[in-house]
């Protein structure tokens, strides 16, 4: 007869997500996960398969947590101004309690850059491709630019967003605002 879970799965995933977000994947041990989540290794393995499976669930949870910013961005129709607002909204989120660790996807992108983890790379690449598509779509609004220029600017914005996600963890508000303003002067 299967055991009944004595914990709320979404709550323990949230705790694991925050731990991975704060420490990264490699620096998060199973012992730390057990302690933070309040469940034992058996329960972690039973529910998620292993640390990697739990990490994938954490990425999914983060994406849901951040969906409000992306939904607002997707629905907007003011082109470059929407992208600029998205940059500011992304930074403003980082000042809220629980979000001070930058962007989990950007952190993961950097941590897994030289790893051969195909599953994580697929998830990160899908996230980044979606972001690039949104930038491309917004750049096309009221634009007389050719597709090659739009593609280059979308690439530029993805890289600028990576930089912004890292800067939000360590730079002053004034420095971040200057960065955003200068980014959009170059478009």
Image: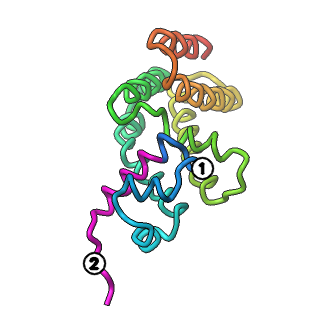
Q: Which disc number belongs to residue 4?
A: 2
**In the rendered image, the vertical position of residue 76 relative to residue 109, given as above or below:** above
Point out the stretch of residues depicted in magenta. Answer: 1-19
**In the rendered image, the vertical position of residue 183 relative to residue 100, given as above or below:** above
Q: Which disc number belongs to residue 26?
A: 1
Q: Position of residue 40 (x, y in %)?
A: 39, 66
Q: Position of residue 101 (x, y in %)?
A: 46, 33
Q: Position of residue 29 (x, y in %)?
A: 53, 54
The kind of secondary structure element at disc 1 is: loop
Q: Residues within 10 Å of mark 1 (few under 14, many from 20)?
A: few
Q: How is the image coloured?
A: rainbow
Q: Position of residue 54 (x, y in %)?
A: 47, 60
Asked if residue 14 is among those painted magenta in the image, a careful observer would answer yes
Dot 2 or dot 1: first in sequence order is: 2
Which quadrant is home to the N terminus? bottom left
Q: Residue at x 54, y 39 (%)?
A: 131
Q: Nearer the viewer, residue 145 or 79?
A: 79
Q: Residue at x 49, y 26 (%)?
A: 169
Q: Nearer the viewer, residue 2 or 134?
A: 2
The kind of secondary structure element at disc 2 is: loop
Q: Residue at x 69, y 44 (%)?
A: 113
The picture quadrant where one finds residue 151 is top right
**In the rendered image, the vertical position of residue 15 relative to residue 172, given as above or below:** below
Q: Nearer the viewer, residue 96 or 145?
A: 96
Which quadrant is home to the C terminus? top right
Contact between marks 2 and 1 (CB within 8 A): the answer is no
């Amino acid at each position: 007869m299967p055991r009944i879970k004595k914990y709320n799965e979404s709550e323990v995933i949230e705790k694991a997500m925050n731990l991975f977000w704060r420490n990264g994947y490699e620096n998060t041990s199973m012992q730390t996960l057990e302690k933070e989540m309040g469940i034992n290794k058996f329960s972690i393995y039973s529910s998620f398969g292993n640390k990697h499976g739990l990490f994938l669930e954490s990425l999914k949870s983060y994406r849901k947590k951040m969906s409000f910013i992306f939904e607002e961005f997707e629905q907007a129709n003011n082109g470059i101004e929407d992208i600029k607002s998205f940059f500011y909204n992304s930074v403003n989120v980082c000042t809220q309690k629980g979000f001070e660790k930058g962007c989990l996807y950007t952190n993961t992108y950097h941590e897994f850059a030289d790893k051969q983890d195909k599953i994580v790379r697929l998830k990160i690449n899908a996230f980044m491709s979606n972001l690039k598509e949104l930038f491309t779509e917004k750049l096309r609004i009221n634009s007389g630019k050719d597709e090659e220029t739009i593609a280059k600017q979308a690439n530029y914005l993805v890289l600028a967003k990576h930089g912004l996600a890292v800067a939000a963890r360590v730079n002053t508000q004034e420095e971040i605002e200057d960065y955003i303003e200068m980014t959009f002067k170059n478009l």
